[in-house]
Amino acid sequence: MRSFPRCFLDFVASFLGLAALLLAAGCGSSQQGQSGASQPPADRAETVIFDIDAGRAVDPRMANPYLPSTQRDKGLHQCMIEPLFMLNYETGKIEPWLGVSMTPNERFDVWTLVLRNGIKWSDGEKFDADDVVFTINMLISNAPFLLSSAQLAQWVARAEKTDSLTVKFTLKKPDARFQLDFFSVKIWSSIAIVPRHIWKDVNPQTFSNNYDPEKGWPVFTGPYRCTGVGETEFTYTRDDNWWGAKSGWKPLPKPRILKWAWYGPSSTVTCQDLTILSRFGHFFDWKVKM
């Protein structure tokens, strides 16, 4: 009897768990304990379901990206927090998003960031250089207690607004990787810019930025808004007023609903899941060569 390596078995188990989630969504069920604003039912074809890598959320309402207790892999990082730039691994180039350009001087100790015009926060407020400068100064002044703050404080002497869309960074020493290391999404996230008009009056070391549907929190710039949270499921609904579409820069994303869900540890997968997987064979197209 042919034996399979553990990594292959874990791979299969992951697909089995995802198939069970798809079945639950297709039948109109929801994870127990989820709270959120009432939403019109979405067609399954308009909904995409993802796995929560880190498992059950201890505090599902927490949405401060700079506290270690916040679980960002539940959709917060993926569909709400937009980066300034992104590294394209296929081309090796840094591509613009909220930022248009970031250029150094000859010594690589002064960098100038130019922001895209027309960006707005999800509550309708304008996104500009004030938000960037505020975020950088907030992190530096709270180092080392916020995520990424110690590294930023090590390199940045000051961040200054030169106009509403331009920020100048003066570094303590030359750094040719400054844009890539701090402001470009690679495998995972980068520095998350936060809205000054909300964060200026709070203590970032204790502010939870809790999910609050009445306030429209958490406020970020992405094309989705959080509309339901729970220990094992998070729901995000497309914001048809997203600045990227309103400005004509990008079309709205096609899925109306995004869900991040945790099915359970791979050890809980049973033989019954094989039947579930067979019902959703059209969702998967993978082959294993013996």
Image (cartoon, rainbow, N blue to C red):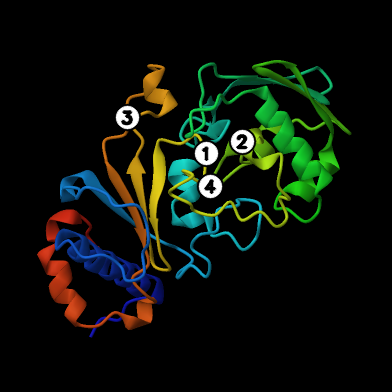
- Between disc 2 and disc 4, whose residue precedes? 4
Q: Mark 4: give few (<14), some (14-19) or many (20+) Cα within 10 Å.
A: few
**Residue 195 numbered tag:** 2
Residue at left offset 40%, top offset 29%: 242
Q: Secondary structure at mark 4?
A: loop
Look at mark 1 in the image and give the residue it sits on.
Answer: 220
Q: Position of residue 135 (x, y in %)?
A: 70, 37
Q: Secondary structure at mark 3?
A: loop
| Amino acid, disc 2 | Pro
Q: Residue 1 versus residue 47: which sits nearer the camera?
A: 47
Look at mark 3 in the image and give the residue it sits on.
Answer: 252
Q: Secondary structure at mark 1?
A: loop
Q: Are marks 2 and 3 in contact (CB under 8 Å)?
A: no
Look at mark 4 in the image and give the residue it sits on.
Answer: 187
State whether residue 20 is above or below residue 197. Answer: below
Q: Mark 1: give few (<14), some (14-19) or many (20+) Cα within 10 Å.
A: many
| Amino acid, disc 4 | Ile
Q: Are marks 1 and 2 in contact (CB under 8 Å)?
A: yes
Viewed as shown, does residue 138 lie left or right of 223?
Answer: right
Q: Nearer the viewer, mark 2 or mark 3?
A: 2
Residue at left offset 84%, top offset 22%: 107
State whether residue 181 is above or below residue 4. Answer: above
Q: CA distance from mark 1 to mark 3?
A: 16 Å
